[in-house]
Amino acid sequence: MRIGFIGLGTMGQPMARHLLRGGHQLALYARRPETLQPFLDEDVQTFKSPAEVAAVSDVVVLMVTATRDVEELLFSDTGVVAGAQPGTLVIDMSTISPEATSTFAVRLAAKQLAMLDAPVSGGSHGAKQATLTIMVGGHKNVFERAQPVFSCLGTNIIHVGDHGAGQVVKACHQLLLLVTAEGVAESLALAQNCGVDPGAAHQVMMSGIASSRVLDLFGSRMVARQFDAGIPVRLYRKDLQIVLDLAKESGAKVPGGILTMDHLSHLASEGHEGTDLSVIITALEQSLARE
Amino acid sequence: MRIGFIGLGTMGQPMARHLLRGGHQLALYARRPETLQPFLDEDVQTFKSPAEVAAVSDVVVLMVTATRDVEELLFSDTGVVAGAQPGTLVIDMSTISPEATSTFAVRLAAKQLAMLDAPVSGGSHGAKQATLTIMVGGHKNVFERAQPVFSCLGTNIIHVGDHGAGQVVKACHQLLLLVTAEGVAESLALAQNCGVDPGAAHQVMMSGIASSRVLDLFGSRMVARQFDAGIPVRLYRKDLQIVLDLAKESGAKVPGGILTMDHLSHLASEGHEGTDLSVIITALEQSLARE
């Protein structure tokens, strides 16, 4: 397939490489030209606008950060819509607002462009290993058409419903991840406050019913006080804001999500926007110190 | 070893059976005589008081529900202390207050009786399969002495500190389990509120970084609306009260624990004391309906 790929960040770069290895032709656009550097020795085409990328692509994949990024890349004067032939498929793998996603799908359909929302879980490790979980919203037949793309990138590829449903499930996933991280932080801080070795508590919890990938990954970093790796607080705040907006719109109750946002916002205000999520344990320690 | 075993409930019954199969001699006492029934065909001795059990035992294991149960079984006129020879080891595998445990250890030491707190994770399935996680507080040399008991019951046997430390770690474990369950409930309720199939959301989350044993076990029951199996709300409320007391005493912050307790208390007030923990998802749905 001729695939346009836009967004060569931590996630996008290894994903684009897997598409190349999968035998696809790649057309690239990057808002930050330096992210094209690793592809200069590869057999790819690079362009100066999303419109030019779209003009030579059967499928355009977006892997960027925010809802407004996706909107601009699609609908600006030099955006995907300005260059795409009717029938082109837009796959947005970013994590953005489900409501906006549904609106984008309608606007694209009016131009005879198909769309799937296909956010992922698995982090940079999953992107590098091509073991991402991909949750897909959109029409089932379009989902089938996109399999040659998805199969290069992930191992769990699940169609979860119509336009926006992929983003809804991603929001649910991030909510669970973050509330679990809050629980891990509270548990390890409780052990420490009671004079019990958090490492021993972590070891026990990993073999008990309370065990989780979050306990394994972020709990280990909390125990080791290593807050410099992984995905920064900034991105989790962005995702959690999507959750809180979605809860408000749909009337769902997410008190654990609200509580966790309080901690992330406090951490951000203290200069921890770029720190790993595991730093959330210090929000509990700080709230102790503040009293 | 000559082992006295007190508390033949859902957990205690399979545990006692594993000790028998492990070649130990068993002396039993039960507050509810009907729980002795399954052992009448076995080569065990039964007694009418904890004191009589203790008199013929090298080790006395307790597996009961509440702090006051343990206190009474140990220190009443016909309790363990009244019958035990100096040097007898008391292993309390119940989930009770860490503070009370430390006090009990001191009172037993004054009678030259050793003690370990050794609560477990793994539920009735782990008890039946002898795959329990056992978190042990007390002196290291006493911990070594108890290995012939523990090795019959569990696969992860971890010494976590001095008297009470086993109960502290169990409290941390239950806090994490319950906050994770709150996160699972919020996530699945959010999916449902947004018109997305909770089963699809569950499937995706199980393969993502948000996956956990709680999502697997309790999340599946929430999706299937099967609230009649497993460990009842009543026992989790008891455990969570231990967590909240411990947090208060130690100055630790457990906002997620407090939030989850609100939901469990609400469920209890609506007659769900005996319902499986997975019913917590209805607390979110009800709070929606109440507005």
Image (cartoon, coloured by chain):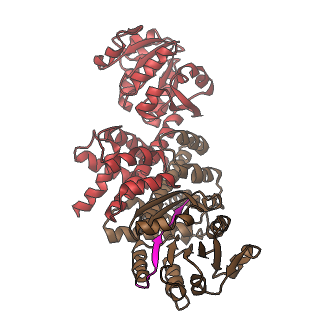
Chain colours: A red, B brown
User: Which residue is nearer to you in this view: A291 or B281?
Assistant: A291
Is the residue B275 above or below the residue B30 in the image?
above
Residue appearing at x 50%, y 25% in the figure: A153
Return the residue found at the far right: B41
Return the residue found at the far bottom: B77
User: Which residue is nearer to you in this view: A80 or A291?
Assistant: A291
Instruction: Tell me if B40 is positioned left or right of B168 in this view.
Output: right
Q: Is residue B228 in the magenta section?
A: no
User: Which residue is nearer to you in this view: A106 or A146?
Assistant: A146
Residue appearing at x 42%, y 7% in the figure: A43
Is the residue B278 above or below the residue B215 in the image?
below
Instruction: Tell me if A14 is positioned left or right of B52 in this view.
Output: left
Q: Position of residue A246 (x, y in %)?
A: 45, 44
Instruction: Tell me if A119 is positioned left or right of B13 in this view.
Output: left
Q: Position of residue B93 (x, y in %)?
A: 52, 70
Q: Position of residue B174 (x, y in %)?
A: 48, 61
Task: Count numbered badges in the picture.
Answer: 0
Q: Is residue A79 visible?
A: yes
User: Which residue is nearer to you in this view: A69 or A277?
Assistant: A277
Instruction: Tell me if B130 is positioned left or right of A203 in this view.
Output: right
Q: In which quarter of the view is residue A52 placed?
A: top left
Q: In which quarter of the view is residue B127 placed?
A: bottom right
Give, as a single range, the part of the protein colored magenta.
Answer: B110-121
Image quadrant holding the N terminus of chain B, namely: bottom right
